[in-house]
Image (cartoon, rainbow, N blue to C red):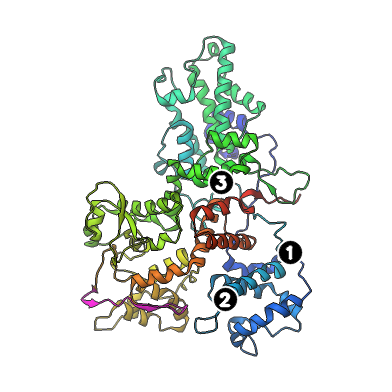
């Protein structure tokens, strides 16, 4: 790590440290992935190296009758809308072999975007039959030999670095002041492919390690500090050389084992001890200062900064195989705690018992206060809570809101944490008739009877237009423009983060909403302005899916306050979704969304898998995701069903092999 440029800049001291911790001929770590969403499958799937089944009997018996009933009106007999034409093939075998076509069908079946609302709809059993047939026959996916997907070796992001250092040393290092913002992929900053390490960041890691350990360095370290007692667990060093060496050896072994998330070998410990430079009598610095040099080496080591999962099945390198227990413990701890494994996880890993106790460990880890980090980091990116305190809102709206932004964000995080820890149906994130408020936020929302200065669970009065994250001030704030609401942004937010069916990005030459109303001399409602904006047929198809959802929230102004009029005109929050359901306002819209459980369960499961694995969703994940969703539908949608399904999945427990 670092190369010649780094060594020149950091000098002899840095060179000694890097040599000391450099792994000796490491086994190959996971290589760079090519992650992609199912929505992009249609353009990539043609490159997949599968041999397709030639037996078309199942297709003729079960699938073609289904297609004739549901799809042929638009996609056969000369119509071929959207480029799909099922009867344009010489044989059933050639039709089955067209992966590009079936990739599109698969995507539409799973997201329930086809057939159109006015056409005959398949039953849930028919959707499942078709999707499973595509997976097993067209793409030859074998449940007995699952592919866990490609996970790139990844460095710790800012939050993971912060909490790893905190759990190691009890020091809350100011990562936001010291490190640049992490890049994101698929909406999250845990993605290995984007967590690069430019040379300036290497220097910052070195500086950060020195800053963290500075209280231990120098001629007079503070022996009473919590940091000193955590590192020098047996107190002050002995005066004799051999006991000094033994003490330094034990300190470094304990620290490196925790920092590297697995046991360290004797050769590495010897290199670290050479950095200490014992015996003490031959050094111009203190024992603590000398040991701290080796601790800095550990904190700038690739073994600490990167999460690598090594190839362990060297006899069959191309085959998927189980992660070793230490890597599994790290996956769990960084998933739920954004940090290193604790003692119990490490002990279970050392004993080879972690796989057998996943359920119990999940329950324990969620009950631990450290799982607040998961609520904050996952929700902060899934629902864009990280944007709440930085999003620009024009005056006088910002003055009206005051300094409620952190409280709004906390409301959403607490609702998620409640559903998580109480093992509730995750649909309550949309439908909850309760929320978390203090007196100030309750007054802002107009909810009476809340006098607490601390956030607490509050039952929302019946028929009150609040409940669920879509009515939280935080979500309404981040989906608005600085000076007005944005039904388009709010609609796209629901499609992307609740239903998992996002509209494609707008073309670069689409004019802003204000451009569509230029020259109009009379007042227009937001609904009327949007109607003008989407007169172009190329825009209408996407806006038809986004706009009704966003207009259903139009009674909430840009800062989340309820209103009945906008610019003196009465607001009409009614609409009809592209799936056919009609609603008259936010309460009925919430009810419709609550009935789309499969879509929401799938969307949330996909988001959480991306966050946990550090890669995008691949086509090989689809069957396992559907299994988790089926289990949630059968198990009352409980959070634990989803979470256990993820950590017990082949994607979480296995790693893909590599070819020499």
Is residue 526 depicted above or below 37 in this figure? below
Residue that lies at the very extreme toward the top in this rendered image:
240
Q: Is residue 104 visible?
A: no
Q: In which quarter of the view is residue 324 placed?
A: top right
Give the extent of the magenta segment. 565-583
Per the image, the residue denoted by label 3 is: 359
- Report x, y in % for residue 478: 36, 61
Element type at marker 3?
A: helix
| Residue 217, position as x, y percentages in the image | 45, 23
Task: Tell me if 580 is positioned left or right of 109 in this view.
Answer: left
Check residue 49 in the rendering and tell me which mark sits there, or answer none.
Answer: 1
In depth, the one of 206 and 619 nearer the eye is 619
Q: Which residue is mark 2?
A: 123
Pointer 2 or 1: first along the chain: 1
Answer with mark 2 or mark 3, whichever residue precedes in sequence. 2
Q: CA distance from mark 1 to mark 3?
A: 36 Å
Q: Earlier in the sequence, mark 1 or mark 3?
A: 1
Q: Is residue 223 magenta?
A: no
Residue 573 located within the stretch drawn in magenta: yes
Q: Position of residue 348 (x, y in %)?
A: 60, 36
Above or below residue 516? Residue 286 is above
Q: Residue at x 68, y 34 (%)?
A: 24
């Amino acid at each position: 790590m670092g190369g010649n440029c780094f060594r020149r800049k950091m000098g002899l001291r840095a060179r000694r440290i890097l040599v000391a911790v450099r792994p000796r001929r490491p086994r190959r770590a996971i290589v760079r992935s090519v992650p992609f969403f199912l929505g992009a499958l249609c353009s990539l799937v043609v490159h997949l190296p599968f041999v397709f089944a030639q037996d078309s009997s199942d297709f003729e018996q079960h699938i073609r009758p289904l297609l004739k009933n549901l799809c042929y009106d638009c996609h056969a007999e000369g119509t071929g809308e959207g480029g799909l034409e099922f009867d344009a093939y010489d044989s059933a075998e050639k039709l089955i072999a067209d992966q590009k076509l079936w990739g599109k069908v698969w995507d539409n079946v799973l997201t329930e975007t086809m057939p159109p609302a006015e056409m005959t709809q398949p039953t849930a059993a028919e959707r499942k039959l078709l999707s499973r047939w595509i997976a097993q026959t067209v793409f030859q996916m074998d449940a007995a030999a699952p592919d866990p997907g490609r996970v790139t070796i990844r460095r710790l992001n800012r939050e993971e670095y912060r909490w790893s250092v905190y759990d190691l040393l009890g020091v809350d290092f100011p990562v936001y002041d010291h490190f640049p913002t992490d890049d994101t992929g698929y909406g999250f900053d845990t993605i290995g492919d984007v967590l690069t390490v430019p040379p300036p960041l290497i220097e910052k890691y070195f500086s950060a390690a020195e800053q963290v350990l500075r209280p231990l360095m120098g001629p007079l370290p503070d022996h009473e500090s919590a940091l000193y007692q955590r590192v020098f667990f047996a107190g002050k060093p002995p005066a004799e050389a051999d006991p000094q060496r033994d003490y330094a050896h034990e300190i470094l072994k304990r620290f490196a084992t925790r920092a590297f998330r697995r046991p360290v070998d004797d050769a590495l410990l010897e290199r670290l001890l050479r950095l200490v430079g014992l015996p003490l009598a031959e050094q111009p610095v203190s024992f603590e200062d000398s040991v701290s040099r080796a601790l800095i080496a550990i904190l700038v080591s690739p073994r600490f900064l990167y999460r690598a999962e090594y190839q362990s099945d060297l006899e069959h390198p191309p085959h998927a195989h189980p992660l070793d227990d230490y890597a599994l413990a790290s996956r769990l701890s960084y998933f739920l705690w954004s940090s290193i494994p604790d003692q119990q996880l490490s002990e279970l890993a050392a004993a080879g018992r972690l796989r057998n106790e996943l359920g119990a460990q999940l329950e324990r880890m969620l009950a631990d206060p450290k799982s607040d980090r998961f609520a904050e980091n996952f929700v902060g990116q899934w629902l864009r809570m990280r944007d709440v305190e930085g999003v620009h809102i024009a005056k006088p709206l910002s003055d009206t809101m005051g300094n409620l932004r952190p409280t709004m964000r906390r409301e959403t995080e607490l609702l998620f944490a409640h559903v998580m820890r109480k093992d509730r149906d995750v649909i309550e994130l949309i439908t909850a008739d309760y929320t978390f408020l203090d007196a100030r936020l309750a007054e802002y929302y107009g909810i009476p009877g809340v006098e607490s200065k601390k956030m607490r669970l509050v039952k929302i009065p019946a028929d009150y237009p609040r409940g669920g994250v879509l009515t939280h001030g935080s979500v309404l704030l981040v989906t608005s423009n600085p000076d007005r609401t944005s039904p388009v942004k709010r609609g796209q937010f629901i499609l992307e983060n609740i239903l998992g069916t996002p509209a494609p990005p707008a073309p670069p030459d689409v004019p802003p909403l204000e451009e569509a109303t230029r020259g109009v001399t009379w007042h227009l409602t937001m609904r009327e302005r949007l109607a003008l904006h989407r007169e172009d047929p190329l825009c209408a198809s996407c806006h038809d899916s986004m706009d009704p959802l966003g207009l259903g929230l139009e009674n909430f102004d840009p800062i989340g306050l309820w209103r009945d009029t906008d610019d003196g005109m009465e607001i009409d929050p009614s609409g009809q979704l592209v799936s056919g359901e009609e609603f008259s306002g936010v309460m009925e819209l919430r009810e419709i969304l609550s009935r789309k459980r499969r879509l929401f369960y799938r969307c949330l499961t996909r988001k959480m898998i991306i966050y946990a694995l550090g890669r995008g969703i691949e086509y090989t994940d689809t069957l396992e995701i559907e299994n988790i969703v089926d289990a949630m539908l059968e198990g009352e949608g409980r959070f634990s069903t989803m979470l256990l399904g993820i950590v017990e999945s082949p994607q979480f427990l296995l790693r893909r092999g590599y070819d020499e």
